[in-house]
Amino acid sequence: MNAPSEMNFEEMLRVKLEVLRREHRDLDEAIMALEITGRPDQLTLRRLKKQKLALKDQIVKLEDRLIPDIIA
């Protein structure tokens, strides 16, 4: 049976998308905080930026799956 509390595939993708967006914002805030310190650890900064870019790629892929292609 399909109970009302169960999520369908699209709803699961939307939840995952929101989690990734939140993580992306958190990384952005962490990067800004490091840059404000004046002399940030460049290695840490580079790693955070790389993680942020990877999250952005995942976000774009999920958005593409959720938004249907419209051929004009």
Image (cartoon, rainbow, N blue to C red):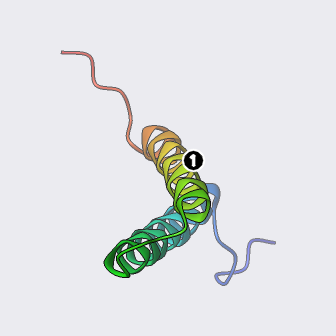
- Find disc 1 in the rendering and name its residue: 54
In which quadrant will I find the N terminus? Answer: bottom right
Query: In front here: 49 or 3?
Result: 49
Q: How many marks?
A: 1
Residue at 70%, 76% (x, y): give it: 6
Q: Is residue 61 left or right of residue 34?
A: right
Q: Position of residue 52 (x, y in %)?
A: 50, 56
Q: Is residue 60 left or right of residue 32?
A: right
Q: Position of residue 35 (x, y in %)?
A: 36, 71
Q: For residue 38, what is the image quadrant?
A: bottom left
Residue at 72%, 80% (x, y): give it: 3
Q: For residue 71, what is the image quadrant?
A: top left
Q: Is residue 47 left or right of residue 24?
A: right
Q: Position of residue 72 (x, y in %)?
A: 18, 15
SS under mark 1: helix
Query: In front here: 24 or 44?
Result: 44
Residue type pointed to by label 1: Ala
